[in-house]
Image (cartoon, grey):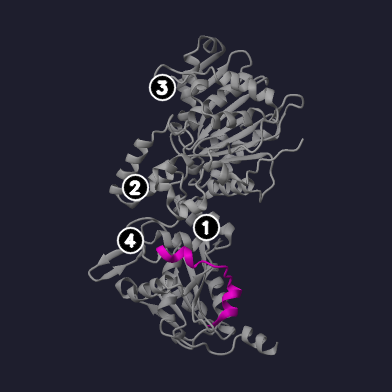
Amino acid sequence: MQWTTACPDWERRILARESLIPSPPLFPDQAKAALAVMDQLRIVDQPGSPTWGELSRPWLRDFVSNIFGAYDEESGRRLIREWLLLISKKNSKSTTAGFIMLTFLIMNWRQAGEFGILAPTVEVANNAYKPAADAIKADDELKELFHVQDHIRTITHRITKATLQVVAADSDTVAGKKWIVTLIDELWLFGKKANAEDMLREATGGLLSRPEGCVLYLSTQSNDPPAGVFKQKLQYARGVRDGRIKDPQFCPVLYEFPDQMLADKAYLKPENFYVTNPNMGASVDEPTLVRLLEQAKESGDESMRGTVAKHLNVEIGLSLRSDRWAGADFWEQNATKLTLDDLLRRSEVVTAGVDGGGLDDLLGLVLIGRERNTRKWLVWAKAWAHEIVLTRRMEIAPRLRDFEKDGDLTIVARPGQDIVAVADILCRVRDEGLLPEKNAIGVDRHGIGALISELESPGRDFQADQIQGIPQGYQLMGAIKDTERMLAGGDMLHGGRPLMNWCVGNARVEPKGNAILITKAISGSAKIDPLMALFDAAALMALNPEGLGASFWETERTVA
């Protein structure tokens, strides 16, 4: 049997209000049987306690049919085994998910089978559990069939002894679970948990011995740039949807705005709200949504950011705060493919900036190369962190692991390994004749001792006047303004790397009289060390330096 879960024409489909499920149910009879069960379940928190069948929209019915219609009764295998539903708030995802889990419990044949709802908190898990429990209590036949224990959030089938259990996110509580079906609610919040990847691996481990099993991931967009397991799953789902990844066992159902609508901010027009709110007119009310957006606008950029993320499913990129660094508005448009080798090959001179390096900081290295002929500034960045930062800064640990996978961050086991790595790169730049004779390396005056010692050590042999302490605070304003102007004019190009994008988005500005300040203290717990390194390097490049001699790249070009 051949089928696909790719939906490459999703943009046309979503604008036309068509289904995002690319294929009909693989086994229509299974789908029909499941819908017959779900159609009878009552939604008790709605006036008159209507049934799910009375209120469900076609998009929901397609989603449910796809899940249950993937089961091959003859072989006892489910042919599609993972789903990710990404959708705006208040589109009945949790109620429907709870009913899906209850339907699985009703149709289950395995004695003492286990089904689980995993969420970052018990409160979130209850969003799916409570509708299922209430539906049982509202139906005499279901009350006979199931034992509901709200105090331990467990539903037990009286005949098969199968159970549906709610578990709050904790690696200890999910260890060893053999759930047939696992519902993971609000995946975006797992993206902020340091141990989430291990936790989900434990929670879904039952699939190995339960061929009829599957995993359902539900989520709204994150109120921060996606991170951790959420980022991983979302990127994978988009790859499957777009046809770049071939995985017919993974079905993405992603209610997102097409890129052009995001670029044009068309998502803010009420007539387009339906794109990520397929339940518009049912569980979602357009006038209420308009009012929420108006209130968010009045409350400031932070509130607006959260509202468009949650109610319009818009992915957050660079910070939209009113106190953001002005350069953030131009950062993304200046991204290009740029490796370290590219920078060295294209540059006539290079300056460096180094910042950070505490045990709970990042150590950021930024190189700015002035391009031959165009004189544009080319930016390459790299960062290091001691592994202790993963425990001291647990709130950003998943994001740091993402940067590690991207190659933008190296996590070291011992202090000093990062300093050695920075010195190695600076030696390479120097040996290729690209560093200036003086004022080549800009460093925050605080905490530079270890780096200076390494650079001046035998074999490195940097001269003291090549290393320049860069004043911070208001004295850095010139470098900040230079960087802003270069970005705004399209004269600063960078690699568009996730780490630097994050740091740029983290930067907050504090006005001080006629000056502006960007400091780590102002930016709070969010890391900006590589961005500060960029300003340090920019302060030296603004001096219009010249390289010490012909680089390897120039020599190669001459010989050729």
Q: Is residue 342 magenta?
A: yes
**Side of 80 where 396 appears, left or right:** left
Residue under the image location 46 percent in, 55 percent down: 263
Q: Earlier in the sequence, mark 1 or mark 4?
A: 1
Q: CA distance from mark 2 to mark 4?
A: 19 Å
Front residue of this view, candidates 159 and 82: 82
Front residue of this view, candidates 432 and 45: 45
Can residue 264 be seen here? The reply is: yes
* 389 lies above or below 533: above
Residue under the image location 49 percent in, 82 percent down: 375
Measured as percent of width and height from the top left, residue 338 is found at 57, 70
Residue hosting label 3: 45
**Side of 205 where 461 appears, left or right:** left
Q: Label 2 crowding class (10 Å Cα cut-off): few <14, some 14-19, many 20+?
A: some
Q: Earlier in the sequence, mark 3 or mark 2?
A: 3
Residue hosting label 1: 387
Residue hosting label 4: 522
What's the residue type where badge 1 is placed?
Glu
Q: Earlier in the sequence, mark 3 or mark 1?
A: 3
Measured as percent of width and height from the top left, residue 552 is found at 63, 84
Q: CA distance from mark 3 to mark 1?
A: 48 Å
Badge number at residue 354 = none
